[in-house]
Amino acid sequence: MSESFLLSQRVAIVGGGPGGYEAALAAAQLGAEVTLVERVGIGGSAVITDVVPSKSLIATADAAVAIAQASDLGVQLFARDDRGNPLRPEVAINLAAVNHRLLTLARQQSEDMHQALLDAGVHIISGHGRLEGRNAMVVSTAPGGTDFDRIEADTIVISVGASPRELPAAKPDGERVLTWTQLYNMKSLPEHLIIVGSGVTGAEFAGAYMNLGAKVTLVSSRDRVLPGEDADAAAVLEDVFTRGGMNVMSRSRADKVENTGDGVSVTLSDGTVLTGSHCLMAVGSVPNTAGLGLEDAGVQLDATGHIQVNAVSRTSVPNIYAAGDCTTFYPLASVASMQGRVAIFHAFGDSVIPIDKRRITSNIFTAPEIATVGWQERDVAAGDADGVVLKLPLAANPRAKMMGVTDGFVKIIAQRASGVVIGGVVVAPKASELILPIAIAVDRRLTVDQMSRTFAVYPSLTGSIMDAMRGLHLVERAGHEHD
Ligand SMILES: Cc1cc2nc3c(=O)[nH]c(=O)nc-3n(C[C@H](O)[C@H](O)[C@H](O)COP(=O)(O)OP(=O)(O)OC[C@H]3O[C@@H](n4cnc5c(N)ncnc54)[C@H](O)[C@@H]3O)c2cc1C
């Protein structure tokens, strides 16, 4: 690629979340003239309302759990009264301080990312962007507001993200009926939080608020929490939730949610009325693709308004790419970033590896966490993957015993004939950190025997990963069944 070709590239990006941010950095690195239009703040929903605040809240919940469980390991906590008598300890959460901390972290992270873009030479415009044809973007003060800028570009990246889905009979009011973006306005722990929706977002907040000390009811329209995830993992979590005192209501659909002034009432489709202090609506997201001029430019959307992209982030229009939650790919910050980078590499003819959905690692930040990669047991059961599955409970792991960890497991899925690791699940504290060796095995197509030769520290939770790899050794020789 000649330098003059690089210098002639003008890249316009709309949306400064992980997708747009990574695309901007990659384009700047390759020498392009880059303009990024963002209407709220760099970092996007990921940093300002979604990932950073929720994971910071969960860090506080984890700390509360660690204190509560410390007595199992012989740690005693107590205060003394004036006469020196021990008082029963109480763990209390100052939610106003917690929320202040997490919103400060989010703001700082957004500012750091803004500065990183400026340092890379990216031109940032604050405003609402929309396409004008296939080679220009117009910036206005708001949707339908006054236009104040226009950018011509050779390559365009759309990374406008998504917003919480709202149901007409359950309109969030920001006071008691809340979306996840409004949770952090609460000044004190909700007395009784009803969460509608038991997908990843609903489950993460249900676990976090339960562990912070709130009474939680989780309303799930399906048979169990986390429909679509590994069934064994979901069962562990549901058990932990129930043991922790959460009211998990399965096969229950919320028809109406109302703010009653001093609380909320949630009417289920069977007529049951639940009452609580607050209600979190976690019923999915809708892509922010309306009114962007996409259809006029010829960019194809699916029936739900997501932009159709291929594995190198290209839309139906050759010079227009899209990344992140507004696309038909997985709604994960890590995926959005990768899509953003891949879009630019492809547009510039740099070396690019198409994104393989089967190699995406994801994590659910509950306690225990649930991390997943690759093909799953249900794919084997459905005959879509020819694999063998081995699951080892963490309760048998020496380090887990020392740490007092009883819930969780490691599950490895290997190709029957070759022993190549094709998937895995880890349910454990910090599973998000433990899944990486399995993800590397899946990505690099390593066999269970190659993995088995790697030393794990003794004692360690990763020891169970290696034990499972060793347990699958026979796969290569005889296709032995391990389930
Ligand atoms: C509660 C919650 C927790 C999550 N936790 C995790 C997690 O732990 N790990 C993980 O990987 N993912 C997580 N996700 C998913 C993650 O937040 C998204 O996948 C990620 O934000 C997608 O990035 P994006 O760049 O597509 O969009 P966003 O982060 O949504 O950014 C899009 C940006 O575009 C801007 N924008 C939109 N329209 C316009 C316009 N017309 N003009 C200008 N700017 C515009 C928006 O203001 C926004 O800043 C979580 C999601 C939720 C809801």
Image (spheres, rainbow, N blue to C red):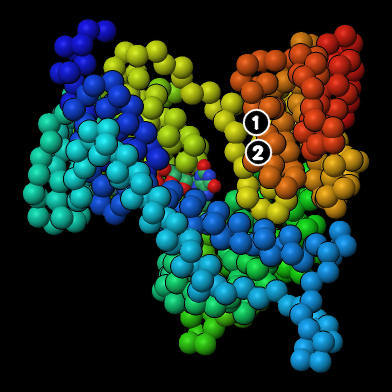
* Mark 1 element type: helix
Which residue in the structure is indicated by mark 2?
433
In this view, the residue farthest toward the bottom is 83
Image: 399 above or below 360: below
Q: Is residue 179 toward the left or the right of residue 61 in the image?
A: left
Locate the C terminus and report the quarter of the image it occupies. top right
* Mark 2 element type: helix
Task: Name the residue type under label 2.
Answer: Glu
Residue at the image point whose x is 42% and y is 55% from the top? 106
**Disc 2 vs disc 1: Cβ atoms closer than 8 Å?**
yes
- How far from the left and from the top, in percent, is residue 145? 13, 57
Label total for image = 2
Residue at the image point whose x is 46% and y is 68% from the top? 100
Please tell me which residue lies in front, 7 or 243: 7
On the image, which quarter does residue 149 sit in? Answer: top left
Please tell me which residue lies in front, 119 or 197: 119
Locate the N terminus and report the quarter of the image it occupies. top left
Task: Name the residue type under label 1.
Answer: Leu
- How far from the left and from the top, in percent, is residue 37? 23, 43
Q: Is residue 479 toward the left or the right of residue 273 in the image?
A: right
Residue at the image point whose x is 77% and y is 33% from the top? 462
Q: Residues within 10 Å of mark 2 (few under 14, many from 20)?
A: some
Residue 448 shows in this picture: no
Residue 26 shows in this picture: yes
Q: Which mark is residue 286?
A: none
- How far from the left and from the top, in percent, is residue 129? 20, 45
Residue at the image point whose x is 81% and y is 19% from the top? 452
Which residue in the structure is indicated by mark 1?
436
